[in-house]
């Protein structure tokens, strides 16, 4: 572990050099807990913000919920800052102010501030990045700040900040080594972002009792999906949303999850913002986020990437692939290129999507914690409905190159499994 920084890092270091420094600074890639980061945050006055802060936790849907909120608030004329993780392609993606990324130099300058303030305190990569981005958000004089939780909630670095409204999007089984192996334990960790006597929105349709109990114990103003707000399909292409004070209808269905749009609309209602219904609908219909069933051009077939990496997100991806297939001829074949991290529930994730896939192409994921194609194949063999044609490759890029040589125009290619997997496509 290194607690000192070469003098060059205070002046002429590139962003790449700073990130390399962050990666070797702390002995553990993940270390939950608020003591160290809060001490540095207090030195820089990063606990309380003049802007309204919305913290978003959840197993899945954090990024898309933030994207919906960002679009709605920007369209309403507010200055909005968003901190999210992980990035897909470049570190700069982690911070947006009015939908724009900041320059390398801005991030380097923020790192220098954090480096000086931390003194001998050891910080993980995520803690360091969180502090730097919070510093930049503090300087930006935003009206609203959206903080996407990295892992869990209660002990996540973002929870150092005193938020004005907190969100839990969904609860699924993931990160069991850190959060527990059942939904009640995971729900409790996520609900740790709630604040006493402040609004708390839960978009999970099957809410764990632990979330309700924790909100009650701290007197959070909890709003629940299905009880306080809901969404429903009107026809194959449109849906409606009903809150406590209004109904929005019709809303055109997109490839972004309606459940997360519903949660975002509940947040807007809780903020008591005066936004015209037509404008709310337009913002929801036009929200987008990279890596979420994102269409990629330049191929002879329909080609998509998605960061789905656990059973819950794979189940949603399967439902969207089914929708896409309805618009295709019966000859349509779905080819899935998959790369996953070794600590994920690969068997259950594949089981959730197997029914919509015709051929699998498993790839080694050449990164920290990356699983090999052979490991994926072994996991697949234990999954349900495992009668697909399967081919293994040394990397994602070679798998894609081979697949696209043998597809027809009516076919669908979907690349999924992790942020690292889709990053390989965006860098091709």
Image: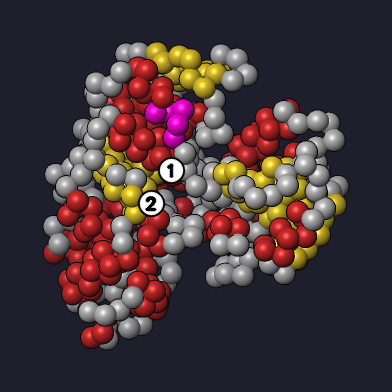
The quarter of the picture where residue 337 lies is: bottom right
Secondary structure under badge 1?
helix
| Magenta stretch in the rendered image | 283-287
Q: CA distance from mark 1 to mark 2?
A: 9 Å
Task: Tell me which colouring the rendered structure shows.
Answer: secondary structure
- Residue at (62%, 70%) from the top-left corner? 366
Residue 424, x across and y down, in percent: 59, 62
Q: Is residue 394 left or right of residue 193?
A: right
Residue denoted by label 1: 62
Q: Are marks 1 and 2 in contact (CB under 8 Å)?
A: yes
- Predominant secondary structure, magenta span: helix
133 in relation to 202, above or below: below
- Judge depth for marks 1 and 2 and give the one in front: 2
Residue 143 % position (x, y)? 20, 40
Q: Is residue 373 above or below residue 299?
A: below
Q: Nearer the viewer, residue 246 or 101?
A: 101
Give the SS element for disc 2: loop
Q: Which residue is mark 2?
A: 84
Q: Quadrant of the N terminus?
A: bottom left
The structure residue drawn at horizontal position 26% and vertical position 64%, both measured from the top left corner, is 106
């Amino acid at each position: 572990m290194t607690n000192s920084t070469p003098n060059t890092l205070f002046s002429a270091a590139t962003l790449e050099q700073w990130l390399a420094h962050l990666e070797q600074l702390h002995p553990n890639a993940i270390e939950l807990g608020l003591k160290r980061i809060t001490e540095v945050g207090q030195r820089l006055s990063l606990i309380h913000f003049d802007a309204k802060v919305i913290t978003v936790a959840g197993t899945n849907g954090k990024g898309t919920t933030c994207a919906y909120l960002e679009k709605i608030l920007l369209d309403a004329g507010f200055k909005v800052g968003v901190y999210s993780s992980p990035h897909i392609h470049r570190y700069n993606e982690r911070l947006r102010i009015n939908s724009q990324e900041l320059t390398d130099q801005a991030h380097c300058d923020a790192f220098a501030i954090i480096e000086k303030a931390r003194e001998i305190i050891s910080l993980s990569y995520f803690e360091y990045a969180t502090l730097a981005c919070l510093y930049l958000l503090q300087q930006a004089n935003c009206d609203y700040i959206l903080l996407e939780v990295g892992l869990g909630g209660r002990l996540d670095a973002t929870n150092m900040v005193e938020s004005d409204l907190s969100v839990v999007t969904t609860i699924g089984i993931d990160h069991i080594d850190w959060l527990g192996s059942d939904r009640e334990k995971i729900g409790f960790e996520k609900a740790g972002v709630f604040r006493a006597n402040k609004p708390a929105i839960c978009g999970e349709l099957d809410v764990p009792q632990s979330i309700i109990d924790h909100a009650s114990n701290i007197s959070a103003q909890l709003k629940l999906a299905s009880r306080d707000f809901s969404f429903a399909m009107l026809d194959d292409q449109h849906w409606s949303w009903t809150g406590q004070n209004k109904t929005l209808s019709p809303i055109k269905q997109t490839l972004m999850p309606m459940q997360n749009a519903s949660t975002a609309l509940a947040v807007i209602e809780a903020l008591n913002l005066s936004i015209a219904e037509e404008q709310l609908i337009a913002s929801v219909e036009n929200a987008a986020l990279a890596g979420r069933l994102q269409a990629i051009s330049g191929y002879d077939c329909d080609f998509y990437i998605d960061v789905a990496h656990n059973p819950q997100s794979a189940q949603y991806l399967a439902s969207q692939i089914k929708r896409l297939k309805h618009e295709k001829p019966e000859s349509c074949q779905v080819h899935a290129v998959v790369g996953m991290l070794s600590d994920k529930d690969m068997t259950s994730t594949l089981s959730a999507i197997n029914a919509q896939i015709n051929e699998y192409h498993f790839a080694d994921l050449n990164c920290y914690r990356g699983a090999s194609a052979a490991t994926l194949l072994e996991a697949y063999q234990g999954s349900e409905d495992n009668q697909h044609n399967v081919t293994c490759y040394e990397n994602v890029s070679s798998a894609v190159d081979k697949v696209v040589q043998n597809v027809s125009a009516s076919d669908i290619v979907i690349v999924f499994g992790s942020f690292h997997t889709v990053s390989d496509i965006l860098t091709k």
